[in-house]
Image (cartoon, rainbow, N blue to C red):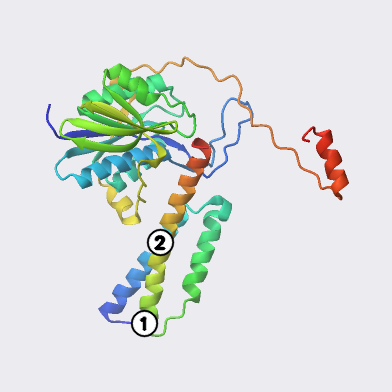
Amino acid sequence: MSNKLKILVPVKRVIDFAIKPRINKAGTGVDTKGVKFSMNPFCDIALEESLRLKEANKGLVEKIHAVSIGPTKAQDILRTALAKGADSTTLVDVGDEEVEPLAVAKLLQKVVEKEQSNLVILGKQAIDDDSNQTGQILAGLLNWPQATFASKVEVEGDNVKVTREVDGGSDTLSAKLPMIITTDLRLNEPRYASLPNIMKAKKKPLEKLKASDLGIELSKRLKTLKLEEPASREAGIKVDSVDELVAKLKEAKAI
Amino acid sequence: MDSNADIDIIDYIRQLFKTLVYMGKDYPVDLGGYPKFIEMAKRGFRNTRVENDHDLTQALAKGNYIIKELESLYFLKKYRYLKRTYKE
């Protein structure tokens, strides 16, 4: 196994974090018309980590390949990835349908084989479906070691040392390449894609594929039955005197 | 305004404005979003009095400063949202 890293970074196009999603009329999904989309923040952290590995260790990283599985418009997200410093990209166009983590992992497995990647850095989860499954399933399919929720990544030759965020502390793992890393929030601070870099990214390579090109059939195993807004909080009341306050508190069995 | 240096400066100012417009597309919706931002940017450019070289350097420095501030604002907004949603 050569020491050069070929990093694969999957990025997902999601509804922007600043926007409050609205449930559609059928109650089975969210409205996406006229809504701003951007790169999933955890994917952004994953991309940033691969860029930092490349910049901090000269000659260590051979290439960073970003891949997105989503509608045609996910191109914009890949352009952002290119602007930030990814070397090449693949768009797996699956139309507007939401793809389940298993299918995503199967597609990614094919892309890993195609690109001969030996390190896959993914965001731990997407902020739209919050599945937190893709990295783990991909590790299972490829039979590679995985380090989830990374808060620090160090590469020493063929070994990768990853510090993970766990409840009330940290957990340090070491594994040989190839491996899967999923990123947590505190791994790094993603950079901003500047305007000149976005313009330059238009000339960088963007490969377009269909799921069938990779020999994967997208069949759904899950059906969304219902989507509901959380119950809204009831308004509070004002009390005029201490006595009233005490009475109300007693009524609520708080004292 | 006819020498090459002046044209360069005008080009630089135009580039600065374009960068701000581009960054404004990410301006937080709860703070007024893109329309509010673009109005502020236009007003800022229109109301900046530049009478000598010193004023010009200062105005351009302020423009670049705002770009950096916006980058940090966007980063913090995103970080805090994620921390609130996934860490607490």
Residue A63 spot, x, y in % from top left = 20, 38
Residue placed at 42% from the left, 40% from the top?
A41
Q: Is residue A117 left or right of residue B9?
A: left
> Looking at numbered disc 2 in the image, what kind of residue is underneath it?
Ile
Residue placed at 37% from the left, 37% from the top?
A43
Residue A188 circle label? none
Q: Quadrant of residue A4?
A: top left
Q: Is residue B71 left or right of residue A86?
A: right
Query: Upstream in the sequence, badge 1 or badge 2?
Result: 1
Secondary structure state at the residue bearing disc 2: helix
Residue A101 spot, x, y in % from top left = 41, 22
Nearest the eye: B64 or A153: A153
Residue A106 spot, x, y in % from top left = 33, 20
Q: Are marks 1 and 2 on the same chain?
A: yes
Identity of the residue furthest to the bottom in this view: B52
Disc 2: host chain: B
Residue B54 circle label? 1
Residues packed near mark 2 inside 10 Å, few (<14), some (14 to 19) or many (20 plus): some
Rendered view: B30 above or below A232: below
Quick check: can you spot residue A212? no
Q: Is residue A36 left or right of residue B65?
A: right
Residue receiving disc 2: B67
Q: Is residue A100 left or right of residue A20?
A: left
Quick check: can you spot residue A12? yes
Identity of the residue furthest to the front in this view: A255
Secondary structure state at the residue bearing disc 1: helix
Residue A147 spot, x, y in % from top left = 32, 28
Disc 1: host chain: B
For the residues marked 1 and 2, what is the alpha-carbon distance in whole angstroms? 20 Å
Nearest the eye: B29 or A98: B29
